[in-house]
């Protein structure tokens, strides 16, 4: 097996005839280094050049081969000089249009010349046209053969032509047929059980599909050869996460005994002004069980906005602090971290537990003092941002790391906490308010145990949502005025296309000024990402205290704001935000008992996709249903928020299209996990260097 792995890894593209250092460099730009990589560089689409199509049957958009005779060739001098060649085949006529041509070319296209052309059919001013078709002259006595297989079109890079790709893949396929370039890794019984074609057969078919194959099936990625590859990729991915999990379980972790754990937690509960919901209590019990296992808990708690995850996290913290362990709570934004700190201070300080605070803005002495208190073990609990991941942050006895809004932190950041715990590995509790559809969660988070808080605290009324064009802005402003005159509060959220924070903040400032002018009776506040932490804090506190009626904000309030009296939210340019983000934002209202409203304002015209998305928001307040829709409309990268970090990117598989493969793949992963060589070979093939276990 080692030899096998070596041969897979080391047969470089330069082993192919005609591939020198220059081509190798171009290929490397696409991540293609080995012959195997090249074989996995599959066509984007295919052209059918295997048949000659009658001109009379062509439709715009078709890509087709036609055989025609020239009727007339003229040069037109219009806006753009062009050569127009009228051709026909007895079933219909067609115009060939060239913008670049030579005199000799025109000469050669004399009336009566027979041509075979390939191109895409477009609507022209008078009739269908082929613009710059590929063409060749047909001599009467030697009609050239048409192609025998569909023509693959490869994703490419500068300086690489389709002909070169075909030539390269031809050579790689010869090696493949000789059995040297690619090994079947799946055992024969597995192939039989899931009715999968062999890997070499699947790869070969996708590079050179036979003419009788359905192009539609191929472009929908539904062909068995494509599903074969998706299956193997999903399997490799699943195995890598399982392996990660298995290795985690070999580490020791603090053990919290269930019968003694409840002292501090009990007192915390007694101090709360509410009872836990059934779902909260269930998840807290799951966590307590995990803490007794002796290996690190890795649990993801999902729950819709407002379901009360924070208090569950606080209970988990209490279980460990009671036994003398330290706990760190991390949030992705300053505002969210501050909100957590406020909650934890309120809940823990009356119980005599100090709450530390570490953000990126802390420098110098204050930072040094916190670091010292963590390193000495004096500080039991700390809340902060990414700053907690930094290398100089050390804990004497870190027992639990709580990570809020997991989707913004990557697996590797999560693992970076590993080294901070001393001899034992800290438990990890990860909380996300972005509900992730089950198949996706099982795939993306196969290294985690999943809990769902699927119940909202009693007394909430669902938010009513309307979708309104921004041409009705004045009307909406009046509505905000009325809402606030009745003693309730409102949010006005500004978004922009540009990701630039400066521009967003500017827009929010302008809007706040405009609203203050239009609604002079209201107290208008402003919060955005460029304000100093203390300023933001002051504004938020004022809003919470009811001293501000209308809070104008950028999307920084997406998470973190909890003001039950706020009952109206206006979101500008709602069509530009993802569903998950809209759902998060909207979750800031509807936290009290009065009826709440959300106005999704869009800038017309609204495209079809945007219409579907905003329609979904209007019809549903169920985070899981919304996430499922988001997944279908935008793909898993967006839902998981990992596009930037490059995680969960599949080369071939698609979690929406291939979702029914997931349960099969999971079952199989369990069986194969023991075969370590196989597991390694699969992971190496599909994930390569992307997996780094050195931190585990
Ligand atoms: P999220 O799950 O979105 O993080 P939070 O933890 O911020 O939600 O809780 C939202 C609000 O609900 C907070 O004001 C919190 O105090 C309150 N809350 C949490 N649990 C309950 C409960 N069981 N009953 C009533 N209110 C609760
Ligand atoms: Mg929260």
Image: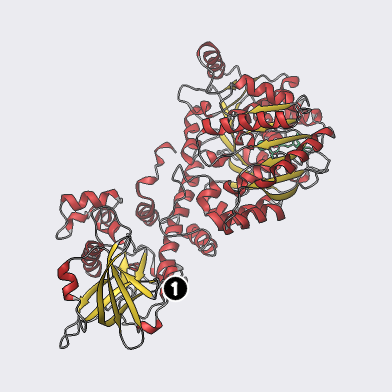
Q: Is residue 313 visible?
A: yes
Indicate the position of residue 376 as horizontal and vertical percent values: 55, 16
Q: Nearer the viewer, residue 538 or 681?
A: 538
Q: Nearer the viewer, residue 46 or 74?
A: 74
Indicate which quadrant contains ligand 2: top right
- Residue, x 53% and y 54% (percent of image)? 634
Give the left or right position of residue 371, taking residue 265 as reference: left
Taking 360 as reference, is 606 above or below it?
Answer: below
Residue 197 found in image quarter: bottom left
Indicate the position of residue 509 as horizontal and vertical percent values: 61, 29
Taking 189 as reference, is 503 above or below it?
Answer: above
Give the left or right position of residue 510, taking residue 206 as reference: right
> Mark 1 falls on what kind of element?
helix
Indicate the position of residue 541 as horizontal and vertical percent values: 72, 24
Q: Is residue 445 visible?
A: no
Q: Quadrant of the C terminus?
A: top left
Give the left or right position of residue 184, taking residue 658 as reference: left
Indicate the position of residue 508 as horizontal and vertical percent values: 61, 32
Identify the residue under disc 1. 216
Farthest residue to the front: give it: 77
Which colour scheme appears in the figure?
secondary structure
């Amino acid at each position: 097996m080692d030899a096998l792995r070596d041969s897979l890894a080391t047969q470089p593209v330069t082993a192919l005839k005609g591939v020198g250092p220059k081509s190798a460099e171009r290929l490397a730009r696409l991540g293609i280094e080995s012959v195997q990589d090249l074989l996995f560089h599959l066509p984007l689409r295919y052209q059918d050049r295997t048949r000659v199509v009658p001109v009379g049957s062509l439709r715009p958009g078709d890509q087709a081969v036609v055989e025609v005779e020239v009727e007339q060739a003229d040069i037109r001098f219009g806006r753009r000089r062009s050569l127009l060649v009228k051709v026909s085949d007895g079933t219909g006529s067609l115009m060939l249009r060239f913008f670049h041509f030579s005199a000799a070319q025109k000469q050669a296209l004399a009336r009566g010349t027979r041509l075979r052309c390939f191109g895409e059919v477009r609507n022209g001013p008078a009739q269908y046209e082929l613009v710059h078709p590929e063409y060749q002259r047909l001599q009467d006595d030697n009609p050239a053969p048409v192609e025998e297989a569909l023509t693959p079109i490869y994703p490419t890079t500068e300086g690489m032509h389709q002909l070169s790709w075909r030539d390269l893949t031809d050579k790689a396929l010869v090696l493949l047929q000789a059995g040297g370039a690619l090994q079947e890794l799946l055992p024969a019984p597995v192939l039989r059980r899931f009715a999968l074609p062999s890997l070499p057969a699947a790869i070969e078919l996708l590079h050179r599909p036979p003419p009788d194959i359905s192009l539609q099936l191929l472009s929908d990625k539904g062909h068995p050869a494509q599903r074969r590859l998706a299956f193997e990729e999903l399997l490799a991915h699943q195995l890598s996460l399982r392996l990660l999990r298995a290795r985690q379980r070999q580490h020791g972790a603090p053990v919290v005994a269930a019968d003694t754990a409840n002292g501090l937690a009990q007192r915390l509960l007694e101090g709360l002004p509410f009872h836990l919901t059934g779902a909260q209590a269930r998840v807290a019990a799951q966590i307590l069980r995990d803490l007794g296992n002796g290996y690190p808990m890795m649990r993801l708690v999902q729950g819709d906005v407002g379901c009360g995850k924070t208090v569950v996290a606080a209970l988990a913290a209490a279980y460990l602090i009671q036994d003398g362990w330290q706990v760190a709570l991390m949030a992705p934004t300053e505002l969210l971290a501050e909100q957590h700190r406020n909650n934890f201070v309120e809940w823990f300080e009356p119980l005599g537990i100090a709450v530390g605070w570490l953000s990126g803005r802390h420098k110098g002495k204050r930072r040094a003092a916190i670091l010292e208190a963590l390193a000495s073990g004096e500080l039991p609990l700390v809340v902060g941002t990414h700053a907690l991941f930094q290398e100089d942050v050390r804990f004497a006895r870190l027992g639990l790391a709580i990570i809020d809004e997991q989707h913004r932190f990557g697996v590797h950041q999560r693992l970076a906490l590993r080294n901070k715990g001393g001899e034992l590995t800290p438990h990890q509790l990860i909380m996300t308010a972005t509900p992730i559809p089950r198949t996706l969660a099982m795939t993306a988070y196969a290294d985690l145990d999943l809990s769902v808080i699927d119940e909202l605290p009693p007394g909430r009324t669902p938010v009513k949502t309307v979708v309104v064009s921004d041409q009705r802005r004045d009307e909406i402003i009046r509505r905000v005025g009325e809402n606030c005159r009745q003693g309730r509060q409102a949010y006005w959220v500004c978004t922009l296309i540009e990701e630039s924070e400066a521009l967003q903040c500017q827009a929010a400032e302008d809007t706040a000024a405009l609203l203050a002018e239009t609604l002079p009776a209201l107290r208008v506040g402003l919060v955005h990402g460029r304000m100093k932490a203390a300023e933001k804090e002051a504004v938020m506190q004022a809003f919470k205290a009811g001293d501000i009626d209308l809070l104008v904000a950028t999307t920084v309030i997406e998470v973190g704001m909890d003001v039950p009296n706020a009952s109206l939210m206006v979101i500008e340019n709602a069509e530009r935000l993802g569903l998950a983000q809209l759902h998060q934002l909207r979750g800031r209202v509807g936290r009290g008992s009065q009826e709440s409203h959300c106005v999704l304002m869009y800038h017309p015209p609204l495209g079809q996709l945007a219409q579907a998305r905003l329609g979904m928001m209007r019809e549903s307040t169920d985070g899981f249903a919304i996430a499922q829709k988001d997944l279908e409309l935008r793909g898993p990268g967006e839902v998981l928020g990992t596009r930037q970090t490059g995680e969960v990117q599949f080369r071939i598989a698609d979690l929406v299209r291939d979702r029914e493969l997931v349960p099969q793949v999971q079952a199989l992963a369990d069986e194969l996990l023991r075969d370590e060589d196989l597991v390694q070979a699969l992971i190496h093939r599909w994930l390569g260097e992307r997996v780094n276990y050195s931190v585990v």
